[in-house]
Amino acid sequence: MRNDSVCPVSRRPSIARVQPTEPLSTLGSAAAADREPASPRASLDAVLRASAAIASGDDPAAVTAQSTPWLAAQVAADAAAGRFALWAESTVIDEHSGTAVVERALFDLLHELAGIRAAWPVGNAGLLHVYGYLFSEEETPFGYKRERWTGGGLAAALDLPPKHFSPWTVPVHESESLLQRVTDAALPWLGEVPGASCAEAAAWVDEWDDTVFARTRVVTAATGAAALVYGVRDGLDTRIPMRLVTIFPLAAASAEWLRSLRSGPPRLRYNLAVAGREPGAALRHSRSGVRRAVGASGAGEQGPRVAQHGLVDHAAIVAEDARLPGRGRQ
């Protein structure tokens, strides 16, 4: 059964906008006060050198302590604040390439630093997608995973400052981190009511069965920049909070691409890992809607920022299976 409903016009989800300060080579280090701040280029070069060294077999603990000392401090701050609980689990085996996008030794180090038990290749999605991807040398069909944090496309799609997701940038409070900035920006888009989270979203897709509920939101800015947010919940009970899986910039969010996003059979996506399920496993139900389109046809995680285009407004959202079993409409 198909139902039509108009997406209500409301404000974008409230996003905590932590304004980064100058880039430093450490987080929470007394020595940082006595040295000149590293330039963004030098900081990126340090990540690239560390990534290459880890990929060649060097000890990631020694490499990151030397080249990117902010990493351990930020992971520790996240663990102390309980931020990893807001993220689901993910496999490091990329669904497009079929290869690991994070080295095994780095996978182990990150989970050790966070105090999280994990069995390769499945671990905490926040650790892997935020920090692990920074050091990934595996080039996917959409480019390098780190570019979502080191480039400005994702920040532009969320109407945030260009360097908002620069991982080496120390925010106002030293207990804050890259993971917190990402979580604060992404999690509100997974709101329970479509009208509350699709006001500035180009499209939304919900997919589920009796034990898994997954949600996709495509976010667009007036400039034409676009991003995709994906999260999951265990079961259909709306009292269980959504957890993040990933967020990445899109090359475009055209009407054609948005329709293709909705047309496939429901399944697990974007390297989400669910206990007892294969990656990409089928789900049973879906509902979706398209509100607006931006840019040219086609989209990719690390594609170029789209040029400014007029918004193609769709009069209604088409909702499939609008009522989930045992609860009212979301």
Image (cartoon, helix red, strand yellow):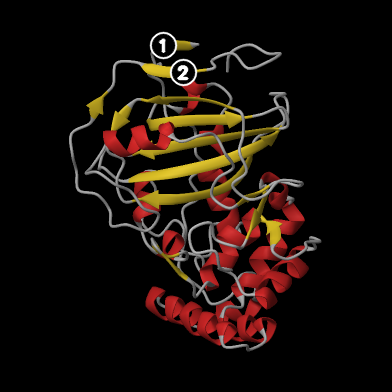
Between residues 195 and 32, which one lies in front from this camera angle?
Answer: 195
User: What residue is at 45 percent from the left and 61 percent from the top?
Assistant: 149
Residue at x 45% of width, y 10% of height: 3
Q: Is residue 195 visible?
A: yes
Would residue 39 appear left or right of 123 to someone viewing this image? left
Indicate the quadrant containing the C terminus: top left, top right, bottom left or bottom right.
top right
Above or below, comparing residue 192 to residue 123 in the picture: above
Can you tell which quarter of the image residue 258 is in?
A: top left
Mark 1 vs 2: CB contact within 8 A: yes
Q: Is residue 298 above or below residue 110?
A: above
In the displayed structure image, the side of residue 65 where residue 189 appears, left or right: left
Alpha carbons under labels 1 and 2: distance apart: 6 Å
Residue positioned 75% across, 63% down in the render: 114
Numbered circles on residues, count: 2
Amino acid of disc 2: Ala
Left or right: residue 135 compared with residue 108: left
Tell which circle, 1 or 2, labels the residue nearer the N-terminal end. Answer: 1
Q: Left or right: 121 with respect to 45?
A: right
Q: Position of residue 50 (x, y in %)?
A: 54, 82
Please report the residue visible at 56 percent of the width from the left and 59 percent of the height from the top: 178
Label at residue 248: none
Q: Which residue is mark 2?
A: 319
User: For this rendering, which residue is in front, 284 or 111?
Assistant: 284
Q: Helix or strand or loop: what does disc 1 sit on?
A: strand
| In the depicted structure, whether residue 238 falls above or below residue 300 | above
Residue 224 image-quadrant placement: top left
**Residue under numbered circle 1:** 4
Q: Is 31 in front, or is 222?
A: 222
- Residue 189, placed above or below residue 75: above
Front-lying residue, 248 or 166: 248
Circle 2 packing at 10 Å, graded few (<14), some (14-19), many (20+), is many
Q: Quadrant of residue 176?
A: bottom right
